[in-house]
Amino acid sequence: MESVNRAQILILFALVVSGIIVGLSVVYTQNLLAGMETSRTLLVFPKEEIRNLREIVVRDFLSVAALIGNDPSAMSNFANNVSDQIRMLYAQKGCYADVTAFKIEIGKVGLVFNAKIVYVGGGLEYNDTLYCEVGGGCT
């Protein structure tokens, strides 16, 4: 009788140990998968795409605004043309991006405008609005 009790305790102990091992392996697998997903997310994060869109506003929009002078309608036409091209290019990549200029006014030195940058792709939505002024840059 005593050997049967020992056998039952041994089997119960083996079941408990195997349950602990299975639980630990599930936690380890989840951590491994989470680490892989995190690294994949970092690889596809569109940091360069957003940086390029900001550069278009800061460099191109401001330089064209300086060349145009005090003509808000010409700046609006330029911004609309650039916006159309950006939307078309990014649609070919399977995402949405747009750069628009609005509230274009004549300031003290030259044109003053707000620029909106939108990027949607890869599970990320990015929106930013910059205040740009010829001779003063964008903030």
Image (tube, helix red, strand yellow):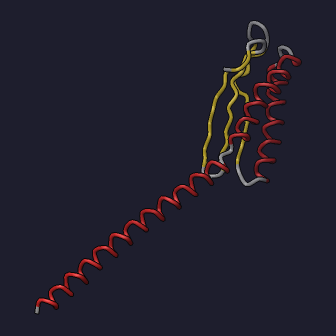
Q: Position of residue 17 (x, y in %)?
A: 31, 73
Q: Does 130 appear above or below 135?
A: below
Q: Quadrant of residue 20?
A: bottom left
Q: Could you tell whether 27 is left or right of 42 in the image? A: left
Q: Residue at x 76, y 51 (%)?
A: 91
Q: Residue at x 70, y 20 (%)?
A: 138
Choose between 65 and 54: the one closer to the eye.
Answer: 54
Residue that sits furthest to the left in the current view:
1
Q: Position of residue 99 (x, y in %)?
A: 73, 35
Choose between 46 and 18: the one closer to the eye.
Answer: 18
Q: Residue at x 87, y 19 (%)?
A: 68
Count all numbered tags in the image, as a single digit: 0
Q: Does 71 appear above or below 37?
A: above
Q: Could you tell whether 42 is left or right of 77 in the image? A: left
Q: Position of residue 75 (x, y in %)?
A: 82, 24
Q: The N terminus lies in which quarter of the figure?
A: bottom left
Q: Position of residue 111 (x, y in %)?
A: 77, 15
Q: Quadrant of residue 81?
A: top right
Residue that sits furthest to the bottom in the current view:
1
Residue that sits furthest to the right in the current view:
67
Choose between 59 and 105: the one closer to the eye.
Answer: 59
Q: The C terminus lies in which quarter of the figure?
A: top right
Residue that sits furthest to the top in the current view:
108
Choose between 44 and 99: the one closer to the eye.
Answer: 44
Q: Residue at x 81, y 24 (%)?
A: 73
